[in-house]
Every structure is written in C-alpha cells, then in structure tokens.
Amino acid sequence: MEHTIQDRTLALAGTFQAAYLVHQIATQGMTDTAALEASINSIFKVDADSVEEVFGDINGVITGLSVMKRQLSNDRHRYDMQITQYVVAILHLSKKLQKRPQVLQQIAEGIQGATEQAQVFHNTHENVIARLADIYQNTVSTIPPKIMVQGQHGHLSNPNNASKVRAILLAGIRSGILWMQCGGARWQVLLKRKAYVTEAIRILALLRQ
C-alpha cells in the first residue's frame, strides 16, 4: 500500500502528541484528556485499515498536529526544546525496535493482555494504564538510551503520573513505528519539516471548516 504525505504527517503528529502529553504531565501534573485517550487508544489499534483509524479519526491527533506545526516552524518564541528532544528519542527507539522482532513480539503479547483488561474496565482506566506502563518498562525501557523525562519531582514521583508517562511513551513508539512504516525517516524531521508543517496546516484547516 502506497502511503501519502497525509499518512506520514498524521503518524508523526502522533509522536509529537505523545511527547507533548509527557511534557505536560512532567511539568504540570495533568494533561489534555481527549488527546490522552486518543493516544492510549492508538496502542490497541493493531489491525487498523488506515492511519486515521489508528487515532479514531483525524481529530484524535489534532493536538499533535498543532504541536508539530509549532515545533517544526521557524517561530522560536513558541518552540519547546524538551518536546523535540522527546520526539527525537522516541523515533530513535522506534527505529531500534524495528530491528528487534522478539521485543516487538513481547510488546504485542503484552498489548493483547492489556486489551483483555481494557474490555473489563476501559482503555484509560488506571489499571490498564499501569499494565501498559509495565509493558513499556519491561521492553522499550530495556533498550538504551532510555528516555529521560524532565519535570517537577512532585509530579514525576506520583505513581499514577509515572504510569501515564510510560504508557504515553509506548503510544509514542507506536506512532513512531507507524510513521516509519509509512515511509518516514528521521532525517525528514529536519530536511522536510516545511512539507510537514504545510500539510499539518492544511489538515488543521480542514478540521476547522
């Protein structure tokens, strides 16, 4: 299946959305509920027929599109280095994971177990979030370099926040791998950022009509 610039933009926006949510929790102790639900839900969409379906629909990644547009534009006043650092780290680990089929299989089996648990509760129930966090800690977190989350100790030392951060990072990895499956490569974040910004602006304009 041939993927379009829209597919790659949406998938990359999923990674920016995850990075933004992690940054919010680490620095504010709270985050956007709708964006959180869309990102967590994407983990469970393992057999989606399209990139849009991974996020429910395009609206599921609207936060990520806005953040990506801001981060990749030339507006230095609205740029947040920490978010971009998270994105770069997520994409780096996503590429490493693609070369480790055993770890990917372990993640898939863990997600299957979490799916069964989510059917009893719901996808963002604290028990499900904790299960997803364990999957991340036992798989992705074992691959160097670890993603070091910066924020206020009071927020990060909260067990529920810590679990949310790990679960969201797992969602970011899911988007990162999806992006690469759609033809994305890390060099594009720098050399093709204008194309991604232009497409993000186009999609956001459609959503606001």
Image (spheres, rainbow, N blue to C red):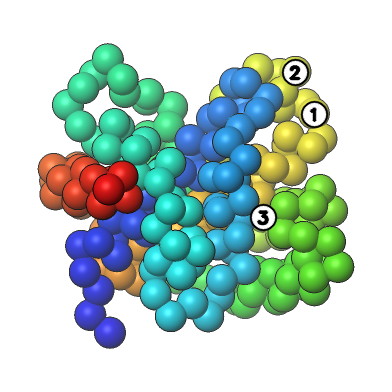
Q: What is the number of the mark on residue 136?
A: 3
Q: Is residue 59 left or right of residue 25?
A: left
Number of on-image labels = 3
Please give the residue where the numbered disc 1 appears in the rendered image. Answer: 158
Please, which residue is most extreme toward the front here?
A: 209
> Residue 190 falls in which quadrant of the image?
top left
N-terminal-most mark, 1 or 3: 3
> Residue 156 falls in which quadrant of the image?
top right
Whether pointer 1 and pointer 2 mark residues with C-beta atoms closer than 8 Å, the reply is yes
Looking at the rendered structure, the kind of residue marked 2 is Gly
Please give the residue where the numbered disc 2 appears in the rendered image. Answer: 154
Q: CA distance from mark 1 to mark 3?
A: 17 Å
N-terminal-most mark, 3 or 2: 3
> Mark 1, residues whose alpha carbon is within 10 Å: few (<14), some, or many (≥20)?
few
Instruction: Write the residue at 34% across / 65% down.
Output: 180
- 118 to 168, vertically: above or below: below
Whether pointer 1 and pointer 3 mark residues with C-beta atoms closer than 8 Å, the reply is no
Q: Is residue 148 left or right of residue 183?
A: right
Residue 57 x, y percent position in the rendering? 44, 62
Question: Which of label 3 and label 2 is nearer to you?
Answer: 2
- 192 to 156, vertically: above or below: below
Instruction: Write the residue at 32% across / 50% down.
Output: 207
Question: Which of label 1 and label 3 is nearer to you?
Answer: 1
- 26 to 153, vertically: above or below: below
Q: Circle 1 sits in a helix, a strand or a loop, which is it? A: loop
